[in-house]
Amino acid sequence: MTPHGPYPSDLPDARWALIEPVLTSWRDQRRARALDIGGPPEHDLRQIMNAILYVHRTGIPWRYLPHDFAPWATVYGHFAKWQQGGVSSSSPARCGAWSAKPRAEGRGPEPSACVLDSQTIKTSANVHLADQGTDAGKRIIGRKRHLGCDTLGLLLTVLVTAANVSDTAASVTLMSRMAAAHPDITKAWVDAGYRTTAIEHGARLGIDVHPVQRPPGTRGFTIIPRRWTIERSIGWLMHHRRLARDYERHPHRSEAMIHLAMIDLMTRRLTGEATPNRRGT
């Protein structure tokens, strides 16, 4: 692999130090189980991660990776294995963000409340018809991202479904995942689209699901208390061109891409690195 100059998406030393332990541990465990035998690893994990972030930030197809990275099949293979092994959703960087940021604001390290919402997104031509649907309300054919975030806007869990799956139906699985991973959560704010089924399922899990209504008489864009937090989180995802449309063939790969975006955000927060955008902020 030919060395290259730094790309804007490359990990600086401080951010790599947050991610490196879990990736090294993953590789060591595979070699210990004789699933990755032979001599020293051919490809550096940091360069593999840099290649994945390059795809994530630029939105290019895997096959279009610059040749100074590892072969695209190797990079995608690592991405797929990390998703299958739960690496993309259990990075220490996420735990660090949950503990460091709340403590700075006088909160506990584990969230006790969350906000739920969804985003309907168009799909690319390589997504199978069985994995997409039509959101009649928004007139979009594609998939729907169901997100659960804490009150700081940090991702707790995500579920990707066809666009015709209602928020209420998806919230059953979403809240079950959240209750299993974050048992301290006792409150969830949602929009008015979440029906009785979601509220009753939340009650069975010990979560008080509270629909937040739009203030009567308002028109156009209005910041709604509690709900604006997750709307902002959805906006953060759009800094990654790979998420501007759903290009992933499988829904679980889409979920991994969303986790990767939040890992990128959290490591930037922990190291004080800005995320430049077109506004220069």
Image (cartoon, grey):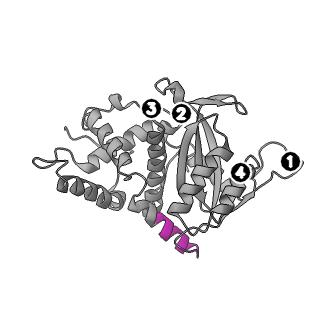
Q: From the top left corner, tell me how far across and down residue 28 is, in percent.
A: 21, 57
How crowded pointer 3 is (Cα within 10 Å; few <14, some 14-19, many 20+) is rated as some
Secondary-structure class at tag 4: helix
Q: Earlier in the sequence, mark 1 or mark 2?
A: 1
Q: Relative to 238, say whether 268 is above or below.
A: below
Rounded to the nearest angstrom, the CA distance separating label 1 from label 4 is 28 Å
Cα–Cα span, label 3 and label 1? 40 Å
SS category of the residue bearing label 1 = loop
Q: Are marks 4 and 2 in contact (CB under 8 Å)?
A: no
Quadrant location of residue 23?
bottom left
* Residue where numbered disc 2 is placed: 245
Q: Nearer the viewer, residue 271 or 204?
A: 204
Q: Which residue is the site of mark 1?
A: 218
Residue 197, numbered label = 4
- Labelled pair 3, 2 in contact (Cβ < 8 Å): no
The residue carrying mark 3 is 249
Q: Amino acid at mark 3?
A: Arg
Point out the stretch of residues depicted in magenta: 97-108
Q: Nearer the viewer, mark 1 or mark 4?
A: 4
Kind of residue at disc 4? Thr
x and y, in percent, of residue 91 in the image: 39, 58
- Find the distance from the CA under tag 4 to the CA under tag 2: 30 Å
Q: In this rendering, which labeled residue sits more in front, label 4 or label 2?
A: 4
Q: Are marks 1 and 4 in contact (CB under 8 Å)?
A: no
At label 2, the amino acid type is Arg
Identify which residue is drawn at 45% across, 43% down: 257
